[in-house]
Amino acid sequence: VVESRFACGLSLLGDSERDPLRTTTRGVGELIQEAEGAGASRVYVGLGGSATADGGTGMAGTWGWNFLDESGQRLTSSAELEKLHATTPGRAPRVTLVGLCDVNNPLTGPDGAVMYVGQKGGSLGDELIATRGLSRLAQIVSSAGGQDFHTVPGSGAAGGLGFGILAFGGGSLVSGASWVLAAKDFDHELGNADLVVTGEGCYDQTSLRGKLSGEVLRRCADAGVPALLVAPDVRPADTYGSTLITGGGVWDARELFRRTRDGVEAALRLLAS
């Protein structure tokens, strides 16, 4: 298992270092190569929490792919993707790649990877550049004989790293939330539950794009099981009728734990009464 956020994650950078037009997924490709060398035959790539918007081109570079402008010069950052004119393919990974997507956004379009550029420190101008760059990447890959991977749900996950797994790695994408819940036999456990408690740092509309908290709440609503959402920040979003425990401000980990514990205990007492 390769967790992309440990290689190109937003949490690895300070506020002043965040620049989704400069950051790269190359480290993800390097970790996949390490797994290959260690004898792995299948690699699951966790997609989420990235600081990138390069469509997986950095990762592909570790397999020998080149992304060239009209003069044949190699592009070196996602800020230059809108100048993309051609690609030269590299080798195929010697492992089966499976991307575990945290969201179901496609690569391009208004609900594509560009939705998250602002969260990664990008400006409105950066969003426009990323939109043009990722659209150009999808166009060139498709015209070179590739499929229209940019429309696949999850291809926009992790700044388009999902697209890279499909287009350059020959892999597949699955919902990370569904994969984790299946591994934990969640639906069976849900059938025996009186209450489900879930949480997220910031619950908003993107939580409903396939993220774990949104998927848990959806399944609880379908099963008619009460749910409790614990989040320090909740922005307008459907909560499927779940009970909310929320609060403003920025808390350190100990304060968040204390408030979460106290809130859950209060909710349980309320339900018991």
Image: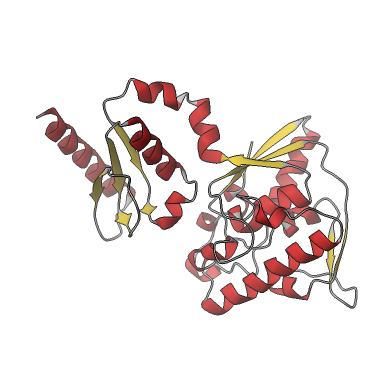
> Residue 220 is drawn in which quadrant?
top left
Question: Is residue 77 visible in the rendered structure shown here?
Answer: no
Location of residue 243 in the rendering, given as x and y in whole percent from the top left corner: 24, 43
Question: Is residue 269 visible in the rendered structure shown here?
Answer: yes
Q: In this view, does 139 lie to the left or right of 208?
A: right
> Residue 131 is drawn in which quadrant?
bottom right
Location of residue 207 in the rendering, given as x and y in whole percent from the top left corner: 43, 51
Q: In the displayed structure, would residue 51 be above or below residue 136?
A: above
Q: Is residue 214 left or right of residue 121?
A: left
Total number of numbered discs in the rendering:
0
Q: Is residue 201 left or right of residue 33?
A: left
What scheme was used to colour the molecule? secondary structure
Location of residue 69 in the rendering, given as x and y in whole percent from the top left corner: 84, 74
Q: In the displayed structure, would residue 187 be above or below residue 18?
A: above
Location of residue 139 in the rendering, given as x and y in whole percent from the top left corner: 77, 65
Identify the residue at horizontal 73%, vertical 48% (top origin).
Answer: 166
Q: Which quadrant: the N terminus?
A: top right
Identify the residue at horizontal 67%, vertical 60% (top origin).
Answer: 24
Identify the residue at horizontal 85%, vertical 44% (top origin).
Answer: 92
Q: Which quadrant: the C terminus?
A: top left
Q: Nearer the viewer, residue 141 or 32?
A: 141
Identify the residue at horizontal 25%, vertical 59% (top origin).
Answer: 248
Q: Which of 67 and 22 is in front in this view?
A: 67
